[in-house]
Amino acid sequence: MTRVTLRRPSRRTTRRAVVVSTAGALVLAAALVWQAAYAGFAASTTPIAAGVTTGTVAVGNEIEGLGTVALPALRPGETYTECVAVTSTGSVPAQVRLYVKDRSATATALPSSLTFTWTAGTGGGVNDDCAAFTPTTSTVTSTLASFGTTYAQGVLPWDTTGGATAERRTYRVSFSLSANAPASVKGASATVTFAWEAQQR
């Protein structure tokens, strides 16, 4: 079983690294990362001095406890599902998108054999729980090899309004290893980092 440990957050970006490894059967782990992008306003007037205020767009993840996800062994043809809640606390309207920030694999065929299915909605998400999850968007399915790697290619756009009240959205992800995965992926490993990025709109 693979344990994924939450790293200490920096001021601009918080990441949780995820490793996919095998011990007889391929073990698949989740990659959960959240990023913050900042937007500012500047104002001035003459002869009256004007204050300059900076607005922000920021997103965070609601993982409780140790921030660790342990996933069971995932064999070819099997699927594992978990949920994560993302909270927007920015002060200005923004759009949040999901994309792959980093990915690597020790077997060339592995990224094409791993499929991720994402859906956004409400409810659930605390400690990866999906019991109360209700989908509100269509489903996005992609292999690791094909998943977008930039904000422009990001999926499941979420328009936030900004302000004093935090806004929350839950994401459900299902991981699957193709039943037709080639023998070359046996014993291979991969690392994938997903990012939720917010940009002012």
Image: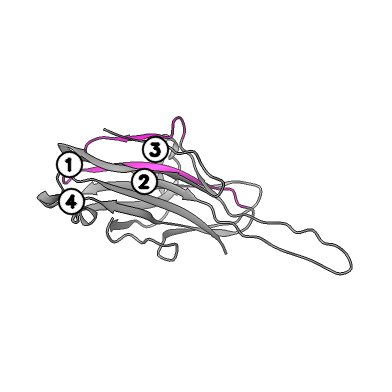
**Mark 1 surroundings within 10 Å by alpha-carbon count, few (fewer than 14), some (14 through 19), many (20 or more):** some
Identify the element where label 2 is drawn: loop
Q: CA distance from mark 4 to mark 3?
A: 23 Å
Q: Which mark is residue 178?
A: 4
Q: Position of residue 6 (x, y in %)?
A: 43, 37
Q: CA distance from mark 1 to mark 3?
A: 21 Å
Residue 109, image quadrant: bottom left
Contact flag, marks 1 and 3 (Cβ < 8 Å): no
Q: Which mark is residue 111?
A: none
Residue occupying image coordinates x 17% and y 46%: 77
- Amino acid carrying mark 3 in the image: Asp
Along the polypeptide, which appears first: circle 1 or circle 3? 1
Identify the element where label 4 is drawn: loop
Q: CA distance from mark 4 to mark 1?
A: 9 Å
- Amino acid carrying mark 2 in the image: Ala
Along the polypeptide, which appears first: circle 1 or circle 2? 2
Q: CA distance from mark 2 to mark 3?
A: 12 Å
Residue where numbered disc 2 is placed: 31
**Mark 4 surroundings within 10 Å by alpha-carbon count, few (fewer than 14), some (14 through 19), many (20 or more):** some
Identify the element where label 3 is drawn: helix
The answer to whether residue 87 shows anywhere in this view is: yes
Contact flag, marks 4 and 1 (Cβ < 8 Å): no
**Residue situated furthest left in the rendering:** 183
- Foreground: disc 2 or disc 3: 2
- Amino acid carrying mark 4 in the image: Ser
**Is residue 46 left or right of 119 when viewed as pictured?**
right
Residue 145, image quadrant: bottom left
Residue where numbered disc 3 is placed: 128
